[in-house]
Amino acid sequence: MKKLTLFTLLGWIFFACSSPSHDLLITNVNVIDVVTGEVLPNRTVAIDGDEITAIYNKTIKPSKGTEVVDGTDKYLIPGLWDMHVHNNWNYEDTNDLMLANGITGAREMWGNMAILRKMIEERAAGKPIIDIYSAGVLTDGAPKIWPSSAEVTDPTAAEALVRCQVRAGADFIKVYSRLDSACFFTIGKTATELGVPFSGHVPEAVPIFDALAAGMLTSEHLYGLHQLGISEQENKQLDSLFEVGNQFEAFRRELKFFNSSVMKEKLQKSDLSKHWFSPTMVTMRGFRSMQDSVFTSDPRISYLPNYMTEDWKPRRTMGSQRMMPSLALMQQLYQNDFQILTILIESKAQIIAGTDYPNPWAFPGFSMHDELEIYVQAGMTPLQAIQTATLNPAKVMNNDRIGSVEKGRLASLVLLNSNPLEDINAVRDIESVILRGKIFNRVELDDMLANAKRKAALPDVMTLLGPMAEEGKLDELLDLLETKLDSLSEHYHLASLEYGLNGMGYQSMNGEKDAESAQEIFALNTRLFPHSQNVWDSYAECFLMQGDTTNAVEYYQKALDIYPCNQVIEKRLQVLKP
């Protein structure tokens, strides 16, 4: 009995002197409590797999194999979320920029489920792809603003589109500017019945308080708010000016009419407790500053390939240089935007941080820091600004695994060199980023940035392929892409390849009337980009142009299977199928 007691005692002594085993320890770090604003000093944060499994206020001896990060004089915050991005078409070029700037998740505002599945596959294979919360297809009214968005003009079609998007895996429904009120309210009702949020632009036909009353979860870009500071009669004057195309005079009068006191009074009388505003101030500022040399000379442009920034030029975005309003007028409009943001903050409105990249001068990753700085300039405390990219996104997405540094939360974190509660610009000074339990130190983050800059400077692959096609070297071109694509990517930027090949296919099919060559080009595109609905759609069209309905139906169906909510393809199949 005495021997047993001694054995038991020795066991307890051993247990008390040993430390639990963990995959990763961040030691002696200052943890920022983003709920209270308290700094918790000298903590050791333990991570196992992708989860924070313990936060100790004592020294923990690491086990063999435990990775240890010294957090002395550092500050740990949750990973930041950019709550308004357009990431689908460019994530290969922007993901590392996001991660290197402490962005560990993003809300995709124009979803593509096939690309999202591809990202999930790459993430499962070990690539450091940030987390994505995604809308379905952008849902607009008639005439739709963007050719590839969905267009609904009656409530029955609106309801069907919502149901289709939810079945396809959309996390929420993105509504847009030209929806009529009947379709908007039907979308809201259907989404609510199915248990998914609806967010986006407050439509031109729907007053903002009506949108909020319908259950719209988030609204973007301050849309609908300007009208709150303008009388009904004055709003009618502005509508008349916009209808006849006199937008510059409308802008001037809008500035003249706007009454901040009227807007503030209306907001303070309203229940804003179930709604979130996503101001996207960096994009609002960017559109208002397209002629400003402070922005056009921003060195961060060197991280972005030309295809992302070409549309930032005024001549492309506004139609021509002459169509741009004066810089002075645009800056006044931005000051009005800024004033509205200050009113939202004073009214205790709920705000989430989003950048709306890649719109003009919204740089993936970098501009989230700019957005938070603007919020502080407009009246937020640094803590409140941090909450717009951490705690608040968790609430909007109803995700209790993110948003704070706590036991049981996802181990997506940012280690900073100084205290962001004292100066919000501390979020720019990043020592390390942890993404789902994997740490990337400063050297690795710098390598990501350097590689992004190197890749952005590469020439467009079409500068090589275009002349080859013009010289009739189609066989050589196809063989090069089929067999040497990896080596080609070291010397050329491949972002335009899918659409460049499609353009070649249509040139062969429509311009040169060479259906056989067109078919070869489209077929190669389906092998290179099997996740793309667009390439299968083009391949099907090639067969249809040749009168081959059987193959056309097969490949249109293949395209629709990738994302079943494409109204255009659906209608084609209805016509073609017996």
Image (spheres, rainbow, N blue to C red):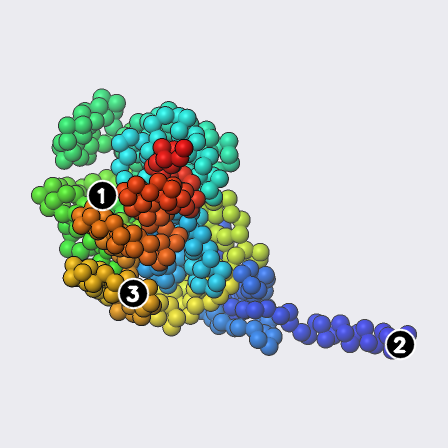
Identify residue type, mark 2. Answer: Lys
Relative to 491, residue 200 above or below = above
Identify residue type, mark 3. Answer: Asp
Q: 10 Å neighbourhood of mark 2: few (<14), some, or many (≥20)?
A: few
Relative horizontal placement of residue 118, taking residue 356 as reference (left or right): right
Q: Sequence order check: which comes first, mark 3 or mark 2?
A: 2
Discs 3/2, front:
3
Q: Are marks 1 and 2 in contact (CB under 8 Å)?
A: no
For label 2, the SS is helix
Relative to 307, residue 234 above or below = above
The location of residue 490, given as percent across then percent down, is 29, 69
For label 1, the SS is helix
Relative horizontal placement of residue 213, taking residue 357 as reference (left or right): right
Real-space CA distance between mark 1 and mark 3, rounded to the nearest whole angstrom: 51 Å
Residue at 39 percent across and 54 percent down: it is 530
- Which disc number belongs to residue 2? 2
The residue indicated by pointer 3 is 479
- Judged from this view, the residue extending furthest toward the left is 322
The residue indicated by pointer 1 is 334
Identify residue type, mark 1. Answer: Tyr
The location of residue 131, given as percent across then percent down, is 45, 54
Residue at 23 percent across and 53 percent down: it is 504
- Judged from this view, the residue extending furthest toward the top is 233
Q: Is residue 319 visible?
A: yes
Q: Is residue 109 visible?
A: no
Residue at 35 percent across and 48 percent down: it is 536
